[in-house]
Amino acid sequence: PNPHPPLTCLLLCCPLQDIRNTVGNIPMEWYQDFPHIGYDLDGKKIYKPIRNKDELDMFLEKMENPDYWRTVQDKMTGADIKLTDEQVDLVHRLQRGQFGDVHFNPYEPAVDFFTHEVMIHPVTNRPADKRSFIPSLIEKEKVSKLVHAIKMGWIKPRKPKDDSPSYYDLWAHEDPNSILGRHKMHVPAPKMKLPGHEESYNPPPEYLLSEEEKLAWEQQEVAERKLNFVPQRFGSLRQVPAYSRFIHERFERCLDLYLCPRQRKMRVNVNPEDLIPKLPKPRDLQPFPTTQALIYRGHSSLVRCLSISPSGQWLVSGSDDGTVRFWEVCTARCMKTLPVGGVVKSIAWNPNPTICLVAICVEQSVLLVNPCLGDKLLYGATDQLLESYVAPEEERVQPVRWVTATAEEHSKGIRLDIQHSKAVKQVTWHSKGDYLASVVSDNSSMQVLIHQSSKRWSQSPFHKSKGMVQVVLFHPTRPYFFVATQRYVRVYNLLKQELTKKLMTNCKWVSSMAIHPGGDNIICGSYDSKLAWFDLDLSTRPYQLLRHHKRALRSVAFHRRYPLFASGSDDGSVIVCHGMVYNDLLQNPLLVPVKVLKGHVITLDLGVLDVLFHPTQPWVFSSGADGTIRLYT
Amino acid sequence: RRLCILKGIYPHEPKHKKKVNKGSTAPRTFYLLKDIKFLLHEPIVNKFREYKVFVRKLRKAYGKSEWGTVERLKDNKPTYRLDHIVKERYPTFIDALRDLDDALSMCFLFSTFPRTGKCHVQTVQLCRRLAVEWLNYIIASRSLRKVFLSIKGIYYQAEVLGQPITWITPYTFAHDHPTDVDYRVMATFTEFYTTLLGFVNFRLYHSLNLVYPPKIDGQADTELKPTEGKEYAMDSESYLEKLSALSASLARVVAPAHEDEVEMDEFPVEGETSEEMDTRKKEQEALEKQKKLFEGLRFFLSREVPREPLAFIIRCFGGQVSWDKSLCIGATYGVSDPSITHHIVDRPRPEPQLVGRCYLQPQWVFDSVNAKMCLPVADYFPGVLLPPHLSPFVTEQEGDYVPPEKLKLLALQRGENPDEESEEEEEEEEEEEDGNDKEEEEDEDESEKEEEMKLKKMEEQKTQSNKALPVKVTAGKVRLEDRKRLEQEQQSEEKRLAIMMMKKREKYLYKKIMFGKKRKVREANKLAAKRKAHDTAVKEEKKKSKKARRA
């Protein structure tokens, strides 16, 4: 019996209801728009009960009717049905998930059909088969097959496994063809370093580390240590303990073997003596100055510049103490002192032996001084030459002013004063002795000026400034003009008035320049302690860059007759080099340092300020920041 | 990684690191593409894959607890052999010998590992077996050359087929296993090394007509049998132990037919002068002599002495050795045997001494081997302060520091009597050292000295001119010196000028070389100074103690 009949069925079973709808199980919405709701058993329409209840009615009914909560609308008939107590009870039980039937017990004791206990009697009463008493034929067949196979030796018992490896002569046939190409490029692992005395358990006492060394060892990085252990001494073998890092070391070796990149390194095994170039011995290159012969004392401040008369008898020096001194070379006697009232930046003796004239740069002017030394005829002739100047009719516009000296000045020896607009840095004579060039410390196009002393007129040769001009020079024989800016040396042809060459010095800041008397070679000294030798025929780059000095070069000089050049530097030394230039164009110049001359005391971080060769003798003068001039012979 | 280890593939340093590394300079390891391709073609890769599958299957079977499957799988465990890799890496036997250093050291280390933990028992046993075989071979061929007791372990150097092979064995103590070591890497290396060593051993044994795997000589075996106690139950185990006792000679395939005594025919090599021949001959004679260093001597090892290394060394040089019966199997004679000549002890005060034998500390054996002669025993009596133990691997070049003990040893080898000359030698040494010091100082202070010398010279010139021939004889002498000095000075100046003219790169190299040389000299000086200080300190102490005694 069905314990819980459907609710609708229960409702339909109400005794009060005769009306049965025959529409079946259809959605009742279909009858929504009709007055009836279905048909009864006789086929007559069942009309919907008249419902005109509104919300208020509903509410009133809800409040007033005590049975409202058990009143349900029948969907099929549209009538209201009041549920009985049994029906309400049933609904409650269903809502609680209980069985509909009050009397149904879901927890009746279970009774097993088969128990877990083994029974002595069979469950079935069937007698056992015959085949369970006789051996199986199929099995027999299988076993006999196996037995046959064993007998015939087709099946062998499993051998006990021998896991110890077997060895044989692996290299019995060493076949050179089997050596692969790989082995040619194979880099065998380097062997471990063999132990030295310090690793011994009983090393000589000198190999034991002292306390300080031990401390240093402990503070070093592991990778930086020279020894990876501390040497120890044990009195006898029985006291030696196990080395605690043994396994580590083996492991590190293993890691090295398979993780370290290997590379063949060419070990430089050069005898250091072979590296030293073979140069001709300085003794074979004599003469050159070797010892300090004379010291010219007198200046109270640093001596900036030196010049020598073409005869080699007189020396002139300009100093920061505002004086120019004339010396006799052989005796170191100061012949004359000329106070000029300013720092003397540069000084140049006229190279023409028939003219006795010195150009001195003092602040904004270049003084032409007749020192009145030597042959009276000679310096008299010079004065006459200067006085023979006749002013031209028309005044030309000049960048400088030519001023004739006053009487007082004339008595001192000053003849002419070329007044520039700015401070003059350097002055240099042409070898003929008529033209002189001056450099103004300025950044305009008027930096370089060329003056003609006999006609007393000046010109500025350049239209455009190409950087700070450091030094200018005249070519000794040909009409060339050298202008050194900070990094480059420009060579101008004065006749054609054009740039012929631009030399790269490879230096940061050129300080000085000198030209070989042959005119084909130039040396440039620079503040970054380099000396560049240019061969003008060869290229615009230095033929050789010499780094002999430790500090900035201040001046360089060529000897007029001997193949010598010298360089003076802030480190207080003068290095004399042999610089042989061959007439043969195929042979490159030979440069050999022959002597390092020391003597100047470094004052104010300055050493040698100017070097100068004697015109005829292999002597070199150097002026230094210590206020002395020294002659090396 | 394992493949790289087995196949001996190592990274390479590229020529243009930045180019290879795509512009970055971060440190990376680079392998050659060719090497990687080479690895891919290796048949063992498939075996590794099979093994991986096997492990997976086994784990699964364990997880399902299917014990039958586990058994079956274990029975069919895939194995691989490394023979072909050995052959491929070392196409010739000499190549293999050359790389034997690490293999031996590793095998000796693994053979000291405990049988539990860290690695397979089989590996340890195999390593032990191979190591013992190797030692036996060295004894049989008498090819040991040098031994060294260091604080790390004992170094041995043998010469096999002209190849020096060095290996290190740790002292026999339990290892405290470090945690930061990857034992799998070591095990992989050992796997390869054992294979290599096995094949090498096989080949070496056959080259000496010995049976491989080694068997103890028949007669010795029978001699040993009765001594063998009941405590050795397992025959197979005791065999290895007997072998490792190193006391018996090995069985030969062919009976030794006095091959050794046949002198080598001399084949004069062209272009070799007679002097070179002589030196070679002398060297060979010395070698032969060294091989028979302990011949006829009978040693007894006390129980506190490390038995294996000493037995090995003594047997390598032809001596007979025995030890206490309870210490190890293989003892041939007892303590009280009157024929014992040397008794090695390592305790400060030995028990009642027997007459007719020398009681010595073990260092005597090592030092004698290194000196290639039996050293005077007086320095090595028990309880005596031992002379320093020097490394035989150091060959001093010119300018290196040589400890005075080594000089003494060299003198001994030359056959001079040390007792008479020792003092003189010491003086000489000191003088030598002084001389060295002077030279070095000169090197260092060359430039300064030159300047000084210049000044001196100038002064001298002045004084000479001033004095104007005061004394004839002395003047001449002074001049001579002057000339020498002048020459030196000139030469050094020339050198300096020439150095100035060097190119930048060469100058750099030159300076580096000179710096290295100077550093070497400095180190040698430091050692010498330390030694001097030590010696003086010791002397003073001695004097003090003497005074104390007198008082």
Image (cartoon, coloured by chain):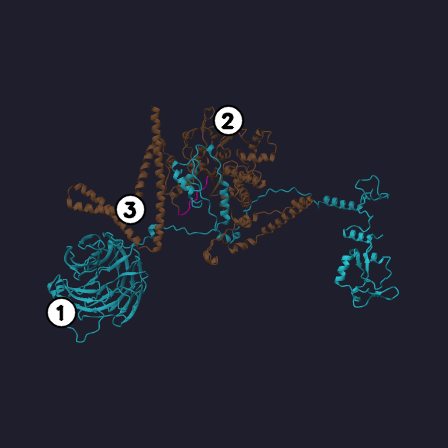
Chain colours: A cyan, B brown
- Tell me the CA gap for discs 2 and 1: 127 Å
Q: Please state the chain letter of the residue tagged with numbered disc 2 in the rendered image.
A: B
Residue at position x 60%, y 29% in the image: B230
Q: Nearer the viewer, residue A92 or B20?
A: A92
Looking at the image, is mark 3 or mark 1 nearer the viewer?
1
The residue beneath circle 3 is B446
How far apart marks 3 and 2 lie (CA) works out to 66 Å
Give the number of the disc on residue B335: 2
Q: Residue at x 23, y 68 (%)?
A: A450
Q: Secondary structure at mark 3?
A: helix
Which amino acid lies under the numbered mark 2 shown in the image of this protein?
Val
Residue located beneath label 1 in the image:
A387
The residues colored magenta run B263-271
Furthest toward the bottom, the residue is: A393
Q: State which chain disc 3 sits on.
A: B
Q: Is residue B399 visible?
A: no
- Label disc, if present, on residue A122 of the rendered structure: none
- Tag 3: residue type? Glu
**Residue A53: percent from left, percent from top:** 77, 63
